[in-house]
Image (cartoon, helix red, strand yellow):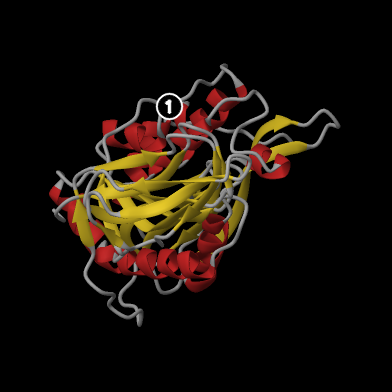
Amino acid sequence: MKQSLRPSGKSQTKKRAETAARPRDGFEFADQLIGPGTAQRIEIPVARLPIGNYVSLPVVVIHGVRPGPVVWLSAAVHGDELNGVIIVEELVSKLSPTEINGTVLAVPVVNAFGLIQGSRYLPDRRDLNRSFPGSKRGSLAGRLAYLFAEHVIGRAQMGIDFHTGSGGRTNLPQVRCNLDDPKTRSLAQTFGAPVALHAELRDGSLRAHAAKLGKPCLVFEGGEAGRLDDHAIRVGVDGALRSLVAVDVLPSTDVATPAPTQFFRSSSWLRANRSGFCRLDVELGDWVEAGETVGSIINPAMTKRHQIKARTTGAVISRATEGIVTAGDAIVHVAETDPD
């Protein structure tokens, strides 16, 4: 039986209003009704593969028995970023529908096409995180963005989107968000990642679309693409649980309070000024001073070693993992100067 992507009968807007007014009733999602105190995995069809199989947008709807907010948790917007998939899976296993307030929309894999191919992008070579709010009849990236925007962002009050570093780089666990918004800043502090970085909105990003709708969104970054990082996963799971308590989805949690988050207003990349073998002397979380040597680039054919010096003072929040670099490659990301 063909699955409808829109509720039938009354307008979607009216149905959403009624759902909010009657939070103890079932939660209608993609033309299905999830009863109070239950959880259900729903597959929203996106497109067929050439062999005829459908690739879907999987959403686990966890609907509590008591009123509360609707929150989304999403991962693998970039298909090769795997830590978030495990973070969302662990969160789903910990969230009992008989114990939470409100509703959680958990999307462990947004970009299944990229995941299958081990690629950051979609088969049409587009970046899903530059395609929001999307289009019902647009490119594949636009159609997937449209479905996520309509069914997930459109139904929730706030969300957490999980990412990793990309392009041969690994990230210190960190939250990126709008620190000028008091509610978002408070939520970032509650999350408890080592660093929270003020991030301007980028056109077409998931977070930019949420912001236009007035919905706070935290972007968690931790680890590197294509690999699972136990530390980053633990920081992401614990931070999300603390955040769900803060917005009254969870009544409590036994997750320990972390060290205070450092807040930064700006950051910059230190780039290789020549090609060669790159050896870095700094690790994620290290504090560096302007002018300090952070590594070297070696040209074995010319038996020359060139020092890499920091241009600014701050904390190392990302670093290259590749041993060979080309002039212009980003190799060290520093959250700059004094914490905010």
Q: Nearer the viewer, residue 244 or 184?
A: 184
Horizontal arrangement in the rendering, residue 155 relative to residue 327 (left or right) = left
**Residue 8 in sight from this viewpoint:** no
> Hey, which residue is sitting farthest front in the picture?
303
Q: Nearer the viewer, residue 22 or 338?
A: 338
Q: How many marks?
A: 1
Q: Residue at x 82, y 28 (%)?
A: 50
Q: Residue at x 41, y 62 (%)?
A: 283
> Hey, which residue is sitting farthest right in the picture?
51
Query: What type is the residue that disc 1 sits on?
Result: Pro
Query: Which structural element holds mark 1?
Result: loop
Quadrant of the drawing holding the N terminus: top right
**Residue 225 in sight from this viewpoint:** yes
Placement of 127 over or under 298, stated as above or below: above
Residue 214 locus on image (x, y percent): 24, 37
Quickly name the residue at label 1.
133
Residue 131 locus on image (x, y percent): 47, 26
Horizontal arrangement in the rendering, residue 294 relative to residue 98 (left or right) = left
Q: Residue at x 16, y 45 (%)?
A: 181
Residue 138 locus on image (x, y percent): 56, 17
| Label 1 Cα neighbours within 10 Å, binned few <14 / some 14-19 / many ≥20 | many
Q: Nearer the viewer, residue 100 or 301?
A: 301
Residue 193 locus on image (x, y percent): 32, 63
Q: Nearer the viewer, residue 200 or 324?
A: 324
Q: Residue at x 46, y 63 (%)?
A: 36
Placement of 302 over or under 139, stated as above or below: below
Residue 198 position by quadrant: top left
